[in-house]
Image (tube, helix red, strand yellow):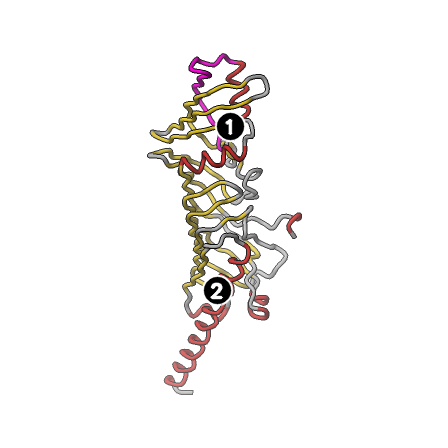
Amino acid sequence: MTPILIGLLGLGLLQAANAEVRRFERLAAADLYGKLAGEQRKVEVKTKVGPEALFGEVHQVTIRASQFTTQGLPLFTEPNRSRRGRVRNLRIELADFELSGLPIQDLKADIPDCRFDLPLATRRRQIRLSQSGVGLGEVTIAERGLETFILRKFSEIKRVKVRIDRDKVFVDGYGEFLIFATDFSVIARLEPQDGDKLVLAHARILLDGKVADDATRKVLLDTLNPVVDLNRDLSLYGAIRVEKLILRDGLLKGVGTTRIPELPANLR
């Protein structure tokens, strides 16, 4: 076979592979769209491929979604599936969404070396991840989002105002607790604990304008901590481990490791 014919054959195969990739993009976006809620939700899946796509290897898959709500994660791995397909890097870009009652401004993550069920993708045009690498990610939450979440999570808190600035969180509100009802003010750092909890630390607490005694301070902190439990409150199943929190100009930014968790038994 002449070099020209070989080149044309390779080009034809690559064009066919690209057409198939575009089809997978549409199907994957539609699959994810169906797992999210919200009339204005938007979902897009884009891929970067080379000749390796003919053998089930993809340079990068980017998932973008916005203006949606979801109770827990919409994406899991299923380790019992084939690992013949490979995504060198899975990039996730989410914006303006609500996760299990917590409004989130944006979330970005890059997760390397993910595997997917290539036979299933070829045979039934379905994308199912079978393995996840561990990457880096960051999530940003506005102070208004924390207010909304606190009121939803803590029935004792009847009114709350949150301000974030200079590595501190300022929480003012009114609460009806087990042994007292009071206006309260908390000035504290918000720190990660065990990678999956956000807790108030080094707190200064005022109750009705007066410094709280140790016993009352403990009651309030025991009620509010953890402010957010990533696994219990948000059903993240270890998808994010927060290593650092940055509090500036009304925004809380969490930075840490990310992965796509294994599908839990109760959801199979």
Q: Is residue 204 left or right of residue 79?
A: left
Mark 1 packing: few (<14 Cα in 10 Å), some, or many (20+)? Answer: some
Q: Does 129 appear above or below 136?
A: below
Taking the spot 50% from the left edge, 33% from the top edge, the residue there is 151
Taking the spot 56% from the left edge, 30% from the top edge, the residue there is 155
Q: Residue furthest bottom?
A: 1
Give the residue type at disc 1.
Answer: Lys
Q: Which residues are magenta?
A: 198-214
Residue 192 belongs to magenta span? no
In-front residue for pair 66/267: 66
Q: Position of residue 4 (x, y in %)?
A: 37, 85
Q: Position of residue 89 (x, y in %)?
A: 44, 56
| Disc 1 target residue | 158
Q: In the rendered image, which quarter contains the N terminus?
A: bottom left
Disc number placed over residue 57 in the picture, else none: 2
Magenta region, main secondary structure: strand
Taking the spot 44% from the left edge, 43% from the top edge, the residue there is 104
Earlier residue among tags 1 and 2: 2
Distance between the alpha carbons at the discs numbered 1 and 2? 53 Å
In-front residue for pair 54/254: 254
In-front residue for pair 265/153: 153
Q: How many marks?
A: 2
